[in-house]
């Protein structure tokens, strides 16, 4: 058993969601697929043999998505952060995850499955925690002005005071 797992309860489409997420990262794979047993299917009113949950890894992080039904709803209070090496990676993830999803602000989005993501440059944390408060403040102001996707070059210019 995997020791630490981020567990994502989805109403449906767990297989589709897992396949999308795995397709977006180079170091990613589906680990296991579980199916609804006959006894559970009868009680839950679903088809026996349909996908129950999928275990997958994204860059060494363990996840499970569950076709859990409409009992619980996700909120933006929990999100998955993806730290991107360059603007091309930010754009790739942003474009794929916002398709049929909801664009939020400051690099946040909710995908079509209801999972909220933060798509950020890999140096954002370093810039925002710089011991020079003026640098950190300029980056914060620049980020907060971005309505959707973050612009890595613009954040770096703010950091340098340009």
Image: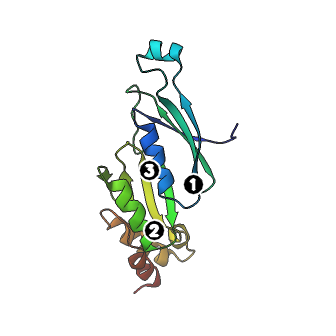
Q: Position of residue 122 (x, y in %)?
A: 53, 68
Q: Earlier in the sequence, mark 1 or mark 2?
A: 1
Please name which of the two marks, 1 or 2, marks the residue nearer to the observer.
1
Chain-order first, disc 2 or disc 3:
3
Secondary structure beneath label 1: strand
User: On the rendered image, what quadrant is the N terminus found in?
Assistant: top right
Location of residue 4 with respect to 60 vertically, above or below: above
Q: Residue at x 49, y 33 (%)?
A: 66
Label 2 crowd bin: few (<14), some (14–19), many (20+), radius 10 Å: some
CA–CA distance between discs 1 and 2? 15 Å
Q: Estimate how packed mark 1 is, as few (under 14), some (14 to 19) or many (20 or more) residues with alpha carbons within 10 Å.
A: some
Front: mark 2 or 3 = 3
Report which residue position mark 3 lands on. Answer: 20
* Residue 13 in the image, given as x and y percentages of width and height: 40, 37
**Quarter the C terminus occupies:** bottom left
Residue located at (37% from left, 57% from top): 96
Up-down: is 160 above or below 143?
Answer: below
Q: Which residue is mark 1?
A: 28
Q: Nearer the viewer, residue 76 or 29?
A: 29
| Residue that mark 2 sits on | 89
Q: Residue at x 42, y 21 (%)?
A: 47
Question: Horizontally, is 109 left or right of 4 in the view?
Answer: left
Q: Earlier in the sequence, mark 3 or mark 1?
A: 3
Residue, far bottom? 162
- Which residue is at 39% across, 41% downward? 75
Kindly indicate whether the residue at mark 3 contacts the one at mark 2 (C-beta within 8 angstroms).
no
Q: Quadrant of residue 6?
A: top right
């Amino acid at each position: 058993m995997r020791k630490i797992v981020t567990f994502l309860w989805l109403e449906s489409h767990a297989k589709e969601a897992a396949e999308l997420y795995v397709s977006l990262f180079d170091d990613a794979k589906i680990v296991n697929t579980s199916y609804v047993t006959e006894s559970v299917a009868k009680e839950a009113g679903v088809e026996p043999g349909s996908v129950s949950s999928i275990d997958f890894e994204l860059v060494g992080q363990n996840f499970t998505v569950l076709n859990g039904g409409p009992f619980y709803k996700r909120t933006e209070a929990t999100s998955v952060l993806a730290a991107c090496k360059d603007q091309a990676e930010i754009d790739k993830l942003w474009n794929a995850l916002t398709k049929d999803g909801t664009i939020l602000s400051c690099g946040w989005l909710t995908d079509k499955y209801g999972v909220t993501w933060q798509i950020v440059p890999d140096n954002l944390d370093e810039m925002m925690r710089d011991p020079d408060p003026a640098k950190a403040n300029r980056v914060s102001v620049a980020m907060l002005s971005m309505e959707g996707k973050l612009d890595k070059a613009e954040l770096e210019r703010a950091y340098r005071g340009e």
